[in-house]
Image (tube, rainbow, N blue to C red):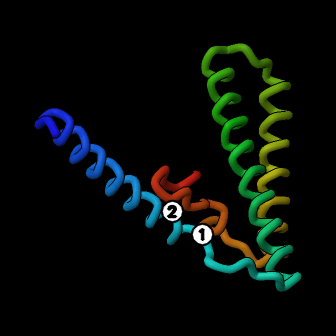
Amino acid sequence: MTDDLHDKILAGERDLDALAGELDKLRDAFPRRVNADPERVEQGLARLVLTLIELLRQLMERQALRRMEHGTLTDDEIERMGDTFMKLEQRMTELKREFGLEDADLNLDLGPLGRLL
């Protein structure tokens, strides 16, 4: 075997070791078993839905702020959006309380990608 081919094989092994390490991190991020308890399933689904809503809310607020900074919104539109965001925040607080969730529960750990929010 040539030295060049031997070096490529060794480099490939290091890449595989790094990949295996990342897979181990992912395995730790997900539960080993699915919990079929109906209450836990409902809470898990609520957590996922509320996380998506929170992500979209944050994106919409950032977009609204950009539009306000650029002067593309009327005073009436700004007022309506403020009211809408306040009502959404109140409803999110109610839903989190109802399902026994906190803000930290909505910030999902995506393993090597980091935290969602």
Give the residue type that dot 1 points to.
Phe
Observer-nearest residue: 110 or 97?
110
Q: Residues within 10 Å of mark 2 (few under 14, many from 20)?
A: some
Observer-nearest residue: 75 or 56?
56
Q: Name the outermost residue toward the bottom.
A: 37
Circles 2 and 1: CB atoms closer than 8 Å: yes
Residue at 67% x, 37% y is 59
Residue 46 as seen in the image, left or right of residue 17: right
Residue at 74% x, 51% y is 52
- Pinpoint residue 66: horizontal percent, then vertical percent: 62, 24
Give the residue type that dot 2 points to.
Leu
- Pinpoint residue 106: horizontal percent, then vertical percent: 66, 62
Residue at 59% x, 69% y is 30
Say which element carries label 1: loop
User: Which quadrant of the figure has residue 93?
Assistant: bottom right
Q: Name the outermost residue toward the front.
A: 1
Residue hosting label 2: 26
Measured along the vertical axis of the image, is residue 27 above or below residue 91? Answer: below
Residue hosting label 1: 30
Which quarter of the rendering shows the N terminus? top left
